[in-house]
Image (cartoon, helix red, strand yellow):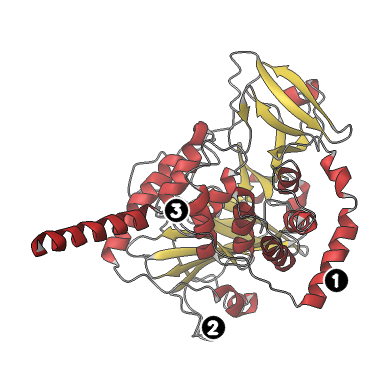
Amino acid sequence: MREFLRYLCIACCCLVSALAQAREPEAPGFRDLLPAGEFQTRLQAALKEIGNPGKLADSRAPVIGLQIAERYAGGAAEQLDIQPGDVVFRVDSEIVWGGSWKLTGKKRQKLQIYSQRENQVRTEFVSADRLGVDTRYFWRPELAFLRGKQRSKGYDEAMIVAAVFRGRDPDLAESCLAQAVKQGYAPDNLSHQLGLEIALIHNHPEVASQFADLLAPQFETDPTIHPVLILRSALANGQFELAYRVLKHQDRHQDEELDPVSYLAAAEWQRRIVAAQPVPPKSPASLAQEMTVDDLESKLQGAAYHSIKTHIPALLRGDGILLKSQTGGDVHYALLQSPQPCLNFDITTHLRIRADDLAVASAEINSARVSLWASHRPDDLNTNAGFDYILAGIEFQSFHKFGLQFGNFSNRIWLFDSSLQETTGSVHKVRFIRVGPQIEVFLNGHRVLLAPAAEEIKPMDIEFRVSGMTLEVPRVEFKELIKPVSASVTAPK
């Protein structure tokens, strides 16, 4: 009998352990970040700016979609009278949230469009494979709350403010979420998404990952979850398998923007690095605050630089060498990168670039200021920063996306801002930092990508010779170290 009881206890312990492992992860708590008096002052100012919540509830806008930022002449959007500001949110039966439109051009397809001017939803039909537009992400979580089942006078105002001000005032937004929970709001997928985005803005990707863990099992089937939020958390935490899942979801990707195959290769590369490095490297959470541009720009000598041997996703469009020339007080630049995303690349031999070969595709690029930062550690840089190499840096003032045309090859460069909401006129600073076996990419001080680096970075010399408007630098060839990638550059279709 004693032996039987011993085995019974062991079996019970195993069952309890299995149940504990299968239990859904708990959501992180929301913090009260503001003193009571300041919270009320900022809350009332936010409510005054928002106005009557009843008018918000009357909006027929979708929660998730793609908003038209620019419409090009002669395209299908012009023929359908789709205006800048309109939101396309459904193609046939599928919600549009990013990546491919899933327009085949082989059949007549139905578009559902929200017009901001008329606050109306209309249906159009198109047979083209593209609309001829540029878009920005569209996410209105306040509308999801107003149309949801969790409504109460005790927390309605707090939830609306949290949703509307999550990007502009994340401290107020998180405090509102904390107050809403105290008033009886039960955390759900909406609050998890708000918490995820606020955590990224607060530069706490590890907290964002906890929210993403709650959302990840459901995003393929729940149309109220914005997959881009999960993707951003996955990139910031080096979870490439999760990123691959998001990109493959409904096969929504464009080869020039999102390449799931590269993420799958990156996931395998990450596993190899983790196996070789059982102790994770120190995460430089405060690194961006410890560094300044002056620390690096004073060392710009144009001498020795290193190639970046890592896959920087096309979402960031920063995996290249930056060239800069100073003419008449304006800084112009060329961004050279592989014609398709690749996990690792080397830079070899020579290329000659002339200024007349480079045409700026959009006017806002003229306001950009770009810096190439030394890849070695300058002597006067803060020695407590805890990093190995500064690989490269970009600074510009423009939209979160902009265009370049190099010869007959057009390229569109994308950068996430601190939230899905577009902010124009702000300065964007991107830093590529090597920390042990990993590359940390920071945008405006916030980590947006944790990517595996190659085992070693081989030094190479790039000599800059500026003669008028001509730059002569080594020719760029990309060699894929995991899987061969064609280096041919083709004109856009």
**Which is nearer the eye, 67 or 411?**
67
**Which is nearer the eye, 116 or 3?**
3
Q: Earlier in the sequence, mark 1 or mark 3?
A: 3
User: As shown in the figure, which amino acid type bears the numbered disc 1?
Assistant: Thr
Residue 75 in sight from this viewpoint: no
- Percent across and percent down for residue 493 are 59, 28
User: As shown in the figure, which amino acid type bears the numbered disc 3?
Assistant: Glu
* For the residues bearing labels 1 and 2, Cβ distance under 8 angstroms: no
Q: Nearer the viewer, mark 1 or mark 3?
A: 3
- Local packing at callout 2 (Cα closer than 10 Å; few below 14, some 14-19, many 20+) is some
**Which is nearer the eye, 179 or 395?**
179
- 301 with respect to 139 (left or right): left
Q: Nearer the viewer, mark 2 or mark 3?
A: 3
- Percent across and percent down for residue 146 are 76, 45
- Give the total of numbered labels: 3
User: Label 1 belongs to which residue?
Assistant: 41
- Please identify the quarter of the rendering in which residue 144 is found: top right
**Element type where label 2 sits in the image:** loop
- Please identify the quarter of the rendering in which residue 274 is found: bottom left
